[in-house]
Image (spheres, rainbow, N blue to C red):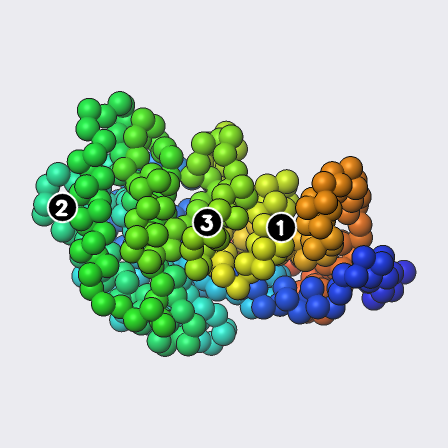
Amino acid sequence: MSIKQNFEMAKKQYGKWGIDVEQALETLKQVAISIHCWQGDDIKGFEVNPSELSGGIDVTGDYPGKARTPEELRQDLEKALSLIPGKHRVNLHAIYAETEGETVERDRLEPKHFKKWIEWAKEHGLGLDYNPTLFSHPKAKDGLTLTHPDPTIRQFWIDHCINSRKIGEHFGKELGTTTLTNIWIPDGYKDIPSDRLTPRKRLKESLDEIFSVDVDSRYNLDAVESKVFGIGSESYVVGSHEFYMGYALKNDKLCLLDTGHFHPTETVSNKISSMLLFNEKLALHVSRPVRWDSDHVVTLDDELREIALELVRNDALDRTIIGLDFFDASINRVAAWTIGTRNMLKSLLYALLMPNDYLKQLQEEGDFTRRLALMEEFKTYPFGQVWDYYCQQMGVPVQEEWLSDIFSYESDVLSKREEGVSVG
């Protein structure tokens, strides 16, 4: 049977439950995933004098073909985007500035250093999101930035974050779509601290100074991102979830939830409904932790489906900024983007094809038998046939067909990078 015929059969099956499959696909088309640029080069960036990766972050693997230049990174992103249905966004870190060989400290970065990214985004109809980079730098070598006891070091990072918000605002103005500028810091201690409060006071004061600078919220939204622990900060992280949740609520900022930044037994899906009650908007970094914040490529697992279900059944898609955050150098990096982003979209389609209102009704009525039975049965409903049709309609490869594109690209482009051949 053809993809179209399979789709029509699936429509009938879902239609028995009053599910409008065509409307589900229209809704999915409107979802823009913010795809993180740093998967393509293992978070190295393009600074003139780069520092070793630090801040409790680690990338493992040495698969050939890593992007070495901004042109190569954009080329790789274009390939990935050509295999992913829909129109999406790209998320940049400050270390991806292009300074034309000039050493520009992070607290002196300006919109002009991202001119080529903006031109590229305009050419491809993409939005851009942004992050100050508070790691992999001599002034962060002891694991402290916005909470550093030295006021001169602290001010350096404050100024970097202020400039980052201005860069985000410029992106929004130029591209006509609001930029999310997200602040994450690695600050913390390896062993048990003797004073937890003072560093958090300094963090609050630093954030207050950063956000005291007026930036137009029509073009830039501010987010703060927590973490429970990291390499070198196993016992204490200054920017905890409780700290940022309180700060965001009090100061009208977005509280960004990273799926890898909590205790291994916590799930972000269980937090979303509570956050939605008290926040106008929510931001996510979707990753896949394996035992810790290991940032594996996103798979279509139970937690990803639950995150999507929470967003869909609570009518929160238009209130949530969905970004990805994983980095795997053990597999083809372009394939990693493709797998992870397609899985995020698959999970949303799965959620859109659930009889969510009826399942809510069953819970209210206390009919837990029927609720559980239907939730399980729908796991094997033909959502894959709907996904195949969606990919075909959006002009991207169906099922595993995209792999042939990936390996052709690897042969024609990525493999030549290891030989030193320019492929800009």
**SS under mark 2:** helix
In this rendering, position of residue 95 left or right of residue 301: left
How many discs mark residues in the rendered view?
3
In this rendering, position of residue 19 left or right of residue 293: right
* Mark closer to the chain start, 1 or 3: 3
Please name the amino acid that badge 3 sits on. Answer: Met
Mark 1 neighbour class, 10 Å CA radius: few under 14, some 14 to 19, many 20 or more: many
Residue drawn at 52 percent across, 48 percent down:
273
What is the distance, in whole Å, between disc 1 and disc 3 at their CAs?
15 Å
The mark closer to the camera, 3 or 2, is 3
In this rendering, position of residue 54 left or right of residue 375: left
Mark 2 neighbour class, 10 Å CA radius: few under 14, some 14 to 19, many 20 or more: some
Residue drawn at 47 percent across, 76 percent down:
123
- Tell me the residue that label 3 is attached to: 275
What quarter of the picture does the N terminus occupy? bottom right
- Where on the picture, by quarter, is residue 220? bottom left
- Tell me the residue that label 1 is attached to: 309
Q: Is residue 382 visible?
A: yes
Residue furthest front in the image? 365
Image location (x, y in percent) of residue 246: 33, 46
Please name the amino acid that badge 1 sits on. Answer: Leu
**Disc 3, disc 2: CB below 8 Å?**
no
- Tell me the residue that label 2 is attached to: 153
What is the distance, in whole Å, between disc 1 and disc 2 at their CAs?
43 Å
Image location (x, y in percent) of residue 200: 22, 39
* Mark closer to the chain start, 3 or 2: 2
